[in-house]
Image (tube, rainbow, N blue to C red):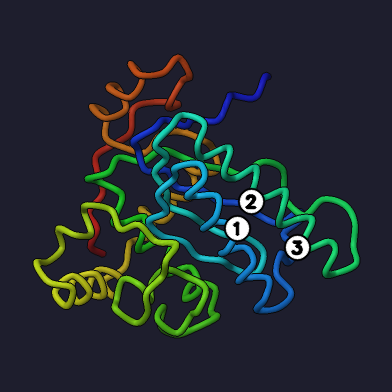
Amino acid sequence: MARLPRLTLPGYPHHVIQRGNNRQAIFACAADYQMLLGLLDENAKKFAVAIHAYVLMGNHFHLLATPQTADGLPQMMQAVGRRYVRYFNDSQKRTGTLWEGRYKSTLIQTDRYLLACMVYIDLNPVRAALVVRPQDYPWSSHGHYIGQRVDKLITPHALVWALGNTPFAREAAYAELVQNGINPVQQAALTDATLQGWALGDPDFVEKLQKNTQRRVSKRLAGRPLSLQK
């Protein structure tokens, strides 16, 4: 069966996962994490992609990003992937592939899933038992959203600005969202939709989305929307 083209549409948030080949490590030291963040910052600007959230794990990374053009996200990911592999291979004196094929992504319904996806991304290091609290992990955007630091890579989505009228109110509201977490059903939905390449949203959203592309966007219409709370 022919592989479906990747579902990418401008103006919609996309959840992206890029894994290391055979789950191998893609970072060997702090400088490697910094290099990848620098490449993402450079190419997000170059290809007009707003990055709302990220986490860099030992053998993969997640992004939540909105491209302004149809080609912006794949162009950014291709440029970052190629340059990072050259850098990593040179620094580690290795050859060959680093990534597990092409990146995985899904287009998500903003009002239903954007904040849930950000929480999902922030909690990755906690689920992996790398830290007890997400604010203790240095390689994610969580610190930016709780006022711990300023991250130049991040472009907050309008839904984040709507969390409060002041920076302190937004930071407190977002920290509470992450503390509340997401349930296993949400976690599975976000993971499965991304790995399979199907759009994630309610039936009306999926139906409307299908009218904007010839590429099939779902196996079937999505079920009822999930609550952000546990």
The local secondary structure at tag 1 comes to: helix
Front residue of 12 and 176: 12
Which badge, 2 or 1, comes first in the chain's sequence? 1
**Mark 2 and mark 1 residues within 8 Å of each other at the beta carbon:** yes
Q: Where does residue 155 sit, x and y in percent of width and height?
A: 35, 57
Left or right: 15 as drawn, with respect to 168: right
| Front position among marks 1 and 3 | 1
- Tell me the crowding category of disc 1: few under 14, some 14 to 19, or many 20 or more residues within 10 angstroms, Cα based: some
- Tell me the crowding category of disc 3: few under 14, some 14 to 19, or many 20 or more residues within 10 angstroms, Cα based: some
Residue drawn where x is 51% and y is 40% of the image: 73
Residue tagged by mark 1? 39
Residue type at mark 3? Gln
Residue type at mark 2? Val
Which badge, 2 or 3, comes first in the chain's sequence? 3
Residue type at mark 1? Leu
- Tell me the crowding category of disc 2: few under 14, some 14 to 19, or many 20 or more residues within 10 angstroms, Cα based: many
- Compute the Cα span from label 1 to label 3: 20 Å
The local secondary structure at tag 3 comes to: loop
Residue drawn where x is 42% and y is 66% of the image: 152
Residue tagged by mark 3? 24
Q: Where does residue 1 sit, x and y in percent of width and height?
A: 68, 19
| Front position among marks 2 and 3 | 2
Residue tagged by mark 2? 80
For residue 32, above or below residue 64: below
Residue drawn where x is 24% and y is 43% of the image: 225
Q: Quadrant of the C terminus?
A: bottom left
The local secondary structure at tag 2 comes to: helix
Left or right: 230 as drawn, with respect to 48: left
For residue 69, above or below residue 123: above
